[in-house]
Image: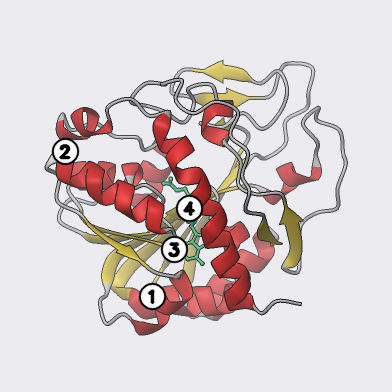
Amino acid sequence: MADARSIRQQNQRSWDAVVPAHASHHRDVPTFVRAGGSSLFPEERALLGDVQGCSLIHLMCNTGLDTLSLANHGAVVTGVDISTAAVTQAQQWASDSGVQATFIQADIYDYLAETRDTYDRVYASYGTICWLNDLHAWANGIARILAPNGRFVLVEFHPTSNMFDAQWQLARAYPMGGRQLDIEGVGDYVAASGGGLTPTGFAAGVHDFVNPEPCHLFQWGVGEVVTALASAGLRITRLDEYLFCNGERPFADMVELPGRRMVAPPHVPDIPLLYGVVATKE
Ligand SMILES: C[S@@+](CC[C@H](N)C(=O)[O-])C[C@H]1O[C@@H](n2cnc3c(N)ncnc32)[C@H](O)[C@@H]1O
C-alpha cells in the first residue's frame, strides 16, 4: 500500500500527462485575459464577493485561467498547484496576457503547512476535494493561511452526483470516509465538455488522448468537508446546493442553458450537482 505522498506524486504524473491535451482545447487565452475576460461562474463570484484589492490564493489552480480571471476582478492573485505542466502553462498565459499573477508549483499539503503568507480570500473549485487524502490537515492549513476576517470559498461537484452513472441510474454508494478510488488516469474532460470548459472558444487540439499515468482519488461527503472546516475553527456562513452543473456535462442528455450551465433533461428528477461553502476566520 503506497503512502499518501507517493500517491499524490503519482497524481501529479497523471496531471502532468493530461495538461497539454486540456490546454490544446483553449483558444487564445492571453487575448481573452488581456481584454479583461473572466471564466468564473456566477456562483463562485457571489460566494467570493467583491475581491477588489484583496489578496487571494487559488488552491489547486490548474492552468490558472480562473486565477487570471480573479486578477481581472481586482484581486492580487497567487495560484498553487502540484502539476509542473499546469503551473508552467499558467505562467505562460500570465506572461503572454500581461496580467499580474504569481504561480507556485507545490503539493497543497506542503504549501499550507509551510507558507508564511496569509490571504483575504482562499478559493478552491471544481474538482479539488477528490485529490485530498486528509481533510483535517487541509482545513487546518486553510485556517492557518487565512488573514483575520478572511474568507474561504469552495465550489465543488456534489458527491450525490457520483452515486449515478452517466445514464442517471443509481449505481454507487454515497462517497464517504476518504475511501480511495483508483482510476485509469485523468482524462480529457475538457474535450468531452464540448465547449463548456473553454470560455475563450473551443479548439479541436489533441485527439483521443489516453493517459498512461493512473491516478488515485479520495471520496468525501459534504458533511465531512464542512465538519473539517468547522473543526479547524472556521465559521460556516453558507452551504449552498445547486441543481445544475457549470461547464461539465457528466450525464446523458443534459440541457445547456445560457452561461455554460447544464441541467438534467425534463424526464430526470433533479439531484444536487454542485455545492458551495463559505467559511470565515474571525
Ligand atoms: C480539476 S483541477 C481543478 C480545476 C480548477 N478549479 C481550475 O481552475 O481549472 C484539479 C487540480 O488539482 C491539482 N492537484 C491534485 N493534487 C494536488 C495536490 N496534492 N496539491 C496541489 N495540487 C493538486 C491538479 O494538478 C489539478 O490541476
Is the CB atom of the residue marked by disc 1 within 8 angstroms of ligand 1's nearest atom?
yes
At a point 88% along the width and 42% down the height, the residue shown is: 171
Is the CB atom of the residue marked by disc 3 within 8 angstroms of ligand 1's nearest atom?
yes
* Depth check, front residue: 227 or 3: 3
184 left or right of 141?
right
Q: Which residue is mark 3?
A: 82
Numbered circle sitting on residue 45: none
Q: Are marks 4 and 2 in contact (CB under 8 Å)?
A: no
95 left or right of 152?
left
Q: Are marks 1 and 2 in contact (CB under 8 Å)?
A: no
Q: Earlier in the sequence, mark 3 or mark 1?
A: 3
Q: Are marks 2 and 3 in contact (CB under 8 Å)?
A: no
Q: Which residue is mark 4?
A: 16
Q: Are marks 4 and 1 in contact (CB under 8 Å)?
A: no
Q: Amino acid at mark 4?
A: Asp
143 left or right of 213?
left
Q: Which residue is mark 1?
A: 111
Q: Earlier in the sequence, mark 2 or mark 3?
A: 3
10 Å neighbourhood of mark 1: few (<14), some, or many (≥20)?
Answer: some
